[in-house]
Amino acid sequence: MGALHSMAHDYEYLRRTLDAMARRVQSALHESLQALRRSDTIGADQIIHDDPDINALQQDIEDLVVRFITQWQPVLRDLRRVLTILAVAGELERIGDYAKQVARRVRQAHDEPYALVMTADLLAMGQMTEHILADSIAAFLAEDVAHARTIAAADDQIDARRHDLTAAIRHAVASGVASFDAAVATLDITQTLERIADRATNIAERTIYLATAAHESLNA
Amino acid sequence: MQTINLSAGDTFQENGKYAVELQDTHIFYGSFRAVKDVSLKIERQKITAFIGPSGCGKSTVLRAINRMNDLIAGSRLNGRILFHGKNIYDPDVDPVEVRRRIGMVFQKPNPFPKSIYENIMFGPRINGWRGTKAQADELVERALRGAAIWDEVKDKLHQPGTALSGGQQQRLCIARALAVQPEVILMDEPCSALDPISTLKIEELMLELRRNYTIIIVTHNMQQASRVSDYTAFFLMDADRAGQLVEYGPTEQIFTSPNDKRTEDYISGRFG
């Protein structure tokens, strides 16, 4: 039992490291949306500055996974656990980059300068994105397949929201309400938020694979 | 006693794709039932791995397949083990003939304290070898080549087999088994006393031998079972301490999505 206890202990450490990374990424997304809401360049700069910390956590997880596999030679669910942690860390790292992209747009709008349009709609979409990300991470950490499957519906809503926002931006440009630069930046943020939701959906798919050993697409 | 009379024609008609078939097999040591109700079909020219914790009966089942348990006083088998459609436990079957057709390699290499050459010729000689010296030389070379050890020993055939390294000794023992032209080779943890490189050489050899022989291997090394075998049988002791077959299927399925929770727990190292 001693050896098994150690394996469980090492796995728990790996899981907690992923949890810490997930919280950093969620915080980066939240703060980038706050920076958007307040046109806060200091907050935006902080997110851009802190992104390497998220990348470093991903590298830590890679090292821990390599060590875990070397020491314990896991199989079946144990192996799927560490392989999916590796994959989820990759998804989180990209979500961190997307949060940084939102922050860059805030900084750029201030520097050029131009006023971003439809920020209230963007923030509403951002909030949906935060929820889907939180749900996917919670489902993954709990290995909860039923919870993971609910992500598909939320992702569809975000896709629909992006579609509506794109039409609204097109209308704003045509009617002269939004400048070309503002429209491009706003479109880019909607696309970025939609991609975060896609990554969250990937995390949900990994959760299903972890628990069932079957690949299931939630992006029908 | 009669020997089992099996022509090449019978081989494929009677047994089809299976080399050995266990039917409702129970094995006893005195009053103790060591193995309970095992039914299993072993596919021809495939490698089948028997896995399970110590005491689960897998080696007992393996030894039953060539009547090696007969050598243990008080051992008894109920059920049938079919080889070419013939129950090898029928009274008219000669166990020595069974062991010639179904060879065995043991956990620790056990070359005889004789030369490499005589180790190979031992089996043919006790089976009434009548060939010439040139034919014997040819048989020795063929067996040693078959066990992938010829190049390492061809210049020292008359030196003692016991002077070889552990891995070489084990391949010599495999060559010795091949010399009597078996159809099935039983391997009881053949690599457990070997270093990793020697282990991989034996595994490569097994994959090579599979082209002509049916191999059944007992192993405690899960990675080895998943690397070399086509089929895996998982055994476990029940509440009466009798070994039973829990799950049997293609190795890829057993090692990726086993049907039985106990299989998953064992393969994952949860017990055993």
Image: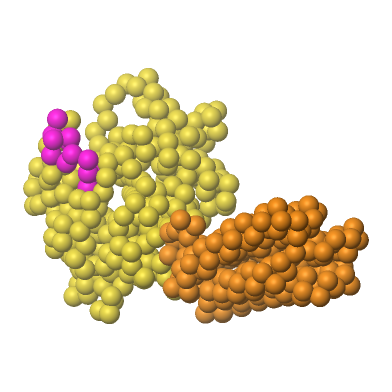
Chain colours: A orange, B yellow
Q: Is residue B260 left or right of residue A155?
A: left
Q: Quadrant of residue A212?
A: bottom left
* Residue under the image location 77 percent in, 74 percent down: A37
Q: Is residue A102 magenta?
A: no
Q: Viewed as shown, does residue B91 lie left or right of A144?
A: left
Q: Residue at x 78, y 64 (%)?
A: A116
Q: Position of residue B88 (x, y in %)?
A: 15, 50
User: Compared to B27, does B214 lie above or below?
Assistant: above
Question: Which residue is found at the position 39% from the left and 60% from the top?
Answer: B257
Foreground of the two, B157 or A220: A220
Q: Residue furthest right?
A: A111
Closer to us: B90 or B37: B37
Does residue A214 appear anywhere in the picture? yes
Q: Is residue B211 left or right of residue A127?
A: left
Quarter of the figure with the N terminus of chain B: top left
In depth, the one of B262 and A94 nearer the eye is: A94
- Residue B12 inside the magenta-drawn segment: yes
Which residue is painted at 48% across and 40% down in the image? B204
Position of residue B246 measured from the top left corner of the image (x, y, whole percent): 29, 66
Q: Quadrant of the C terminus of chain B?
A: bottom left
Picture mark count: 0
| x, y percent for residue A174 | 70, 52
Answer yes or no: is residue B118 visible.
no
Q: Quadrant of residue B123?
A: top left
Residue A52, horizontal then vertical, whole percent = 82, 64
Q: Which residues are magenta?
A: B9-20
